[in-house]
Amino acid sequence: MLARIRDRVRFVTLALPFVMLAVAACSSGSGGTADGLTVTDAWVRVTSADQPAGGYLVIVNASADADALTGVSSPAFGSVQLHETVTMSGEPGSSMMGMHPVSEIPVPANGSVALEPGGYHLMLMQPTGAIAVGDTVELTLTLRNANPITVSATVKGT
């Protein structure tokens, strides 16, 4: 009986990364893959030409090694920063949301990280040309251990 349970646990442990990749492959958006990492659901929110855009995506790590997103570049923007939204304490009983740059975003082994509104996200600044809702922009992700991954992100409005 104990051997049967051990075999089932071993099967689930070995199958999990493949299931995560299959789920990521079925997600919407034009993603990319490198070294066990898959990027899906990439999109950019534009508000106006004079404001930075927000970038969002999901990174799934099917490998047994943790990694980290360390940078992003795009030919559509002069600068891209990694940011995190945080709750800042104000006066007693009140709190405000704010954001600050981070040097990297951890991607756990056999796990995922979502860059989404209200959490980790990209700040895309200095557009190199006009960007409209419905366009796609290229994002190249730099990771600590994996090769760079390039994805197409759909541009959405507010």
Image: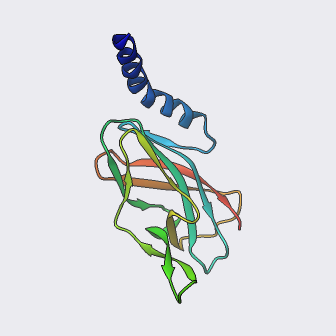
Give how far across and how far down residue 23 sits, in percent: 56, 33
Q: What residue appears at the point 35 percent right and 14 percent down from the top-left corner?
A: 2
Give how far across and how far down residue 62 sits, in percent: 40, 35
Residue 82, quarter of the rendered image:
bottom left
Q: Is residue 61 left or right of residue 118?
A: left
Rendered position, 86 above or below 74: below
Give how far across and how far down residue 29 sits, in percent: 61, 45
Residue 17, quarter of the rendered image:
top left
Give how far across and how far down residue 110 sits, in percent: 39, 38
Q: What residue appears at the point 56 percent right and 59 percent down from the top-left corner?
A: 116
Query: Residue 92 versus residue 123: which sits nearer the camera?
Result: 92
Where does the N terminus fall, quadrant-wise? top left
Q: What residue appears at the point 33 percent right and 48 percent down from the top-left corner?
A: 67
Rendered position, 86 above or below 44: below
Number of marks in the rendered image: 0
Q: Is residue 136 left or right of residue 87?
A: right
Rendered position, 105 above or below 67: below
Query: Residue 31 versus residue 8: which sits nearer the camera?
Result: 8
Where does the C terminus fall, quadrant-wise? bottom right
Query: Residue 149 versus residue 5: which sits nearer the camera?
Result: 5
